[in-house]
Image (spheres, rainbow, N blue to C red):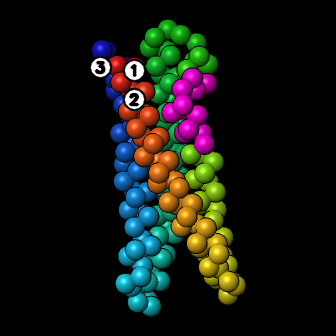
Amino acid sequence: MDVVRAAVLLVHPILALLLIRIFFRQRSWRKISTSLKSEEREESLQEHQNVGDAVMLYLLGIISIAFIAQIGRAVLEGKPALEYLIPGHYHGWAGILALILMTILWRLGRKTRDLKEEGKTHSRSRDLHGRMSDVMAILVVIHAFLGFLYLLELF
């Protein structure tokens, strides 16, 4: 295997693993928040919201890197880039689905924050945000596993 080709192909999964770690740490906030009091909880909530915004940006970056890596792969293999940009496997399509679902999760978090700041009932939105996070956790694990299988196919 060509070292350059391997490096190009491994950038996306390595960064994705870091994002998965951040995502699961972010999810643990629900459990941690129950033991926090008043001001400490508010500071922790603010950090949770900031990390949520950053996760969304990181996700966009990692998906962009995946597409750039596929273009690089096409160039290195002397094939048309379009051949590699349209996903031909479940992992690629699931990545696009993950972007949609993560956008919904992020918007639910922002909606919850806004409702709370307006003094309106936000428990339904908060609970939906939490359940959506649970679903995303399962899908993230499946997506990562399929990505691993896809990498084995490429190498």
Asked where in the image residue 17 lies, by quadrant, the reply is: top left
N-term-proximal mark, 1 vs 3: 3
Q: Magenta residues? A: 86-97
Number of residues whose C-alpha sits closer than 10 Å to that of mark 2, classed few (under 14), some (14–19) or many (20 or more): few
Q: Secondary structure at mark 1?
A: helix
Q: Secondary structure at mark 3?
A: helix
Q: Secondary structure at mark 2?
A: helix
Which residue matches tag 3?
Answer: 3
Relative to the observer, which residue lies in front, 11 or 20?
20
> Does the magenta segment cover residue 148?
no
Q: Can you tell which mark lies on residue 153? A: 1
Residue 122: % across, % down: 64, 79
Q: How many numbered marks, from 0 up?
A: 3
What's the magenta bit mostly, secondary-structure-wise? helix
Label 3 amino acid? Val
Label 2 amino acid? Leu
Residue 128: % across, % down: 61, 67
Label 1 vs label 3, nearer the camera: 1
Residue 69: % across, % down: 47, 27
Residue 47 seen: no
Check contact, mark 1 vs mark 2: CB within 8 A. Answer: yes
Number of residues whose C-alpha sits closer than 10 Å to that of mark 1, classed few (under 14), some (14–19) or many (20 or more): few
Asked where in the image residue 24 lies, by quadrant, the reply is: bottom left
- Left or right? Give the position of 153 relative to 67: left
Number of residues whose C-alpha sits closer than 10 Å to that of mark 3, classed few (under 14), some (14–19) or many (20 or more): few
